[in-house]
Amino acid sequence: MREEKVLHDATLCLLINPDNEVSLAVKADKIGKGCRNGYGGGIEPGETPRIAAVRETLHEAEVIVLPEDLGKIGIMYFYNTKTDGSIFVCKMHVFIARRWEGNPKETREMLDPQWFSADVLPIDKMMPADTFWMPLVLKGKKIIGIFHYAPFQKKLIADPIIEEVDFVPEY
């Protein structure tokens, strides 16, 4: 049986180019395997969400983003049901970067990076919750989202709750 990864604090960076397209690559492993997503992962002890986003973007896309070039645009709470019925919550901090050094490259963790218009996202190849919140943040909205997933994060088991906000807290 597949291992159920438990992640409580995570970060995600969406790279937006001058044509207002977002770089999405295919996750090679772990949560979201086979789905197109931005660059991110777990926050390590002692790291801030912003520093974790910088580290993960370098690791997963070989792109250098400076902390001050990250705009905080969302916090998502994922209530994840495990196969034993227990639930863990992952708090994901979402950032947008419009300035960075380098071009997104394929890495061991993220395959086939491509640019997508906010109006033509690969919805059928994204994680279920992403199809609700990502179009909003790509249109400039700041949001707080709550999503409930079935085991292995392949299906939502409740209606999403998304609130537009004026300010997203740093933590």
Image (cartoon, rainbow, N blue to C red):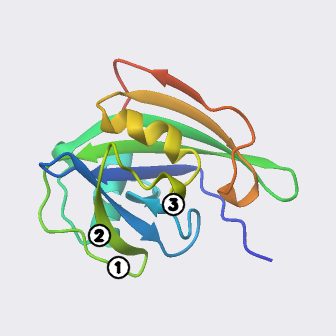
Q: Give the amino acid type for the residue marked by disc 3 in the picture.
A: Lys
**Mark 3 and mark 2 residues within 8 Å of each other at the beta carbon:** no
**Measured from the top left, where is residue 148 in percent x and y?**
69, 40
Find out whether the residues at labels 1 and 2 contact each other: C-beta distance under 8 Å: yes
Mark 2: secondary structure: helix
Q: Name the residue under label 3.
A: 125
* Amino acid under disc 2: Ala
Q: In this view, does 149 lie to the left or right of 125?
A: right
Q: Position of residue 57 (x, y in %)?
A: 30, 62
Q: Which residue is drawn at 34% across and 27% down?
A: 141
Q: Mark number for residue 107?
A: 1
Nearer to us in this view, 117 or 68: 117
Q: How far apart are marks 3 and 1 (CA)?
A: 19 Å
The residue positioned 88% from the left and 57% from the top of the image is: 84
Answer few, some or many: residues within 10 Å of disc 1's Cα (few below 14, many 20 plus, some between 14 and 19): some
Element type where label 3 sits in the image: helix
Check if mark 3's residue and mark 1's residue have beta carbons within 8 Å. Answer: no
Residue at (44, 69) in percent of width and height: 26
Dot 3 or dot 1, earlier in sequence: 1
